[in-house]
Image: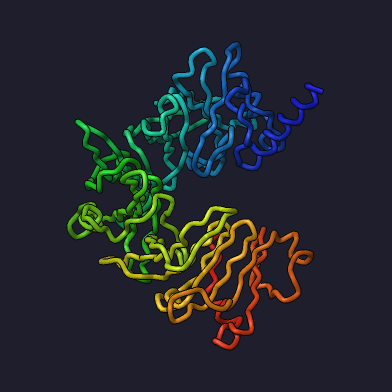
Amino acid sequence: MKRGLAVFFLFTFLVCALCGCTPTLTGVDNLMRPPKLSGENTGIEEAFSRATANRSIKMKTPTTGEYRSAYVLKDIDGDAEKEVITFYCNADDETAVYMHILDRVEERWETVADIKGKGSEVDKIDFCDMNGDGVSEIVVCWSLFESSGSKVMTVYTAAFGKNTGTVRELASEPFSQMVHIDMNADENDDILLVLLTSENGKNRTVAKLLMMDSDFGIYCPGSVELIPALRVSSLQSQKADRTDNLQALVYADCVLNETTAVTEIIYWDAQASRLCAPLTADNASDTPKTARAVHLSVADIEKDGRLDIPTAKPLENAVTVNSSDEQPLELTTWLQFDGESLQVKTQGLMINSSSYMFRLSEAEAENMAIVNNIPDRTCTFYARSADGARGQALFQLVVFPATERTRRRPTEYVTLTESSTLTYNYRITEYGTQTGVDSAYLETHFVLIQ
C-alpha cells in the first residue's frame, strides 16, 4: 500500500513538471532528487544526478511567478535551443540555494554552470531582454530564510559554447516587489523594483528603475519616493500603447494599515528624464482618491488592456447575506489614469463569491435595494419606495455550477452567460418588465470578472 502511494505521488509530480506547473504537494522540497523526464528531455535528470553524485540534496522550486516547475526550460544564450535551469540546496545546509544550468551538447545534457544564490528559497525566476540583443537575461528573486519581506533580485547573463559556459552576475538588489517592463519605449525591457524599509519607526517605500547599457552594465536612471506602506500587496504593469499615445505604467497597491490600501502609479517622464509617481501627494492626504479596503486590487475590469483602480463605498439598503451573517454591500467605482488624472471608468456591485460585476449608475443605485445571498448564489434587485424602503422585486440573478445548469435551472430562468465553471441565469419579474427591465438591460450591465 505504501509503495503504491509513493508511485502515485511521484507520477503526479512528474505530470505537473512536464506541464510547467507546480504540484500541490507539501513535501516537494523534501524530494532528494528531481523527477525523471521523458521524450526529448530524456537525460536531464541523469545529467543532474551525475553533477550532484555522492551528495544529499533537496530540490527548490520557485514559489511565485510564471515558472514554477522543478526544471525551467528557456533559451538563455540565443542559440534557439532551450537550456535547463533547476534549483537545489544541500540537505545538510539549507541556508543557500544553488542555481544549476544544463545545456544540450551533441545530444547529451551537460552541466554548464552551478551558482550559489543569494537566499535560502527561490521566490521567482523571470527572463527579460534588457539590451535588445535578442538574448534573455535571467532574473532570479531570492527570499531569505522564508521571510517574504527580505528578498534579493539578481540579474545574470549567460553565454555557452561547446563544453564551455559562463554565467555572469550583472546586478544584485534588495527589493520587496519587482516587475519588468519597457518603461521608456526604447523596445528594451527594464526592471522596476519597489523596496520597503523601516528606520527609527518610520516606513519608507521607494520605487527604483534599472536599465542596461550596451556593455551589459546595469544602472539606475532614477527613483521616486512613494507613500510609506506596511507592504505592497501587488505590482502590475501596463505596456505603452502608441496608438492611444499612452506611456507605460506600473501600479503598486500599497497597504497603509490593517484596513486601508491605496494605489500608486509610476511612469518614466522622458522629457524630464525622471521617474514619476503622480498620485503620491493625493495618497498622503486625509481623503485619498484611491483609498479602499485592503482586499481590493487593481485589475483590468473591462478587459480592454488597461488597468483600473477600485474604490468602494457601502450602498444604502444593499446587503450581503451569508447564513445568519449580514454585511453591507458596496458600490465599487473603477478609476482609470488618462496620463494626467484619474477618471471614472465604470462602477458596479462586485459579487466576488460568484465572480461577476453588475454595473450600476449612481441613480440606479439610489433607486434600488439589493440582497446578495451567498449560500444560494442569488442576488435579488428590488425597487425602493418613496420612503427608501425595499419594494417589489425587479429581477434576480442566480448562479449554478456549469455541470448542473440543465438539472437545477428552474424553467422561469433564462441563461445570461457562462464561464468554464459557472452558468449565470436571470429572472425578470412582471413588475420589473413594467419598469423597463429586459434582457438587453441585463446583458449591458453584467460583467464576468474571472
Identify the residue shown where x is 64% and y is 63%. 419
The quadrant holding residue 33 is: top right
Question: Residue at 37% across / 49% down in the picture?
Answer: 189
| Residue reaching furthest to the right | 1
Q: How is the image coloured?
A: rainbow
Q: Is residue 132 left or right of residue 16?
A: left
- The quarter of the image holding the C terminus is bottom right
* Rendered location of residue 104, percent (x, y): 59, 32
Does residue 213 appear in this view?
no
Residue 67 vertical position relative to residue 408 in the rendered view, above or below:
above
Quadrant where the N terminus sits is top right
Residue 72 in the image: x percent, y percent?
56, 37
Camera-side residue of 88 and 37: 88
Q: How many marks?
A: 0
Q: Is residue 46 left or right of residue 138?
A: right
Give x and y (percent) for residue 312: 39, 61
From this viewpoint, is residue 264 visible?
yes
Where on the picture, by quarter, is residue 376?
Answer: bottom right
Q: Position of residue 29 (x, y in %)?
A: 57, 25
Closer to us: 77 or 42 = 42
Q: Residue at x 58, y 82 (%)?
A: 440
Say which residue appears at 33% left-offset and 66% top-offset. Answer: 246
Position of 91 with respect to 201 (left or right) is: right
Q: Residue furthest left?
A: 272
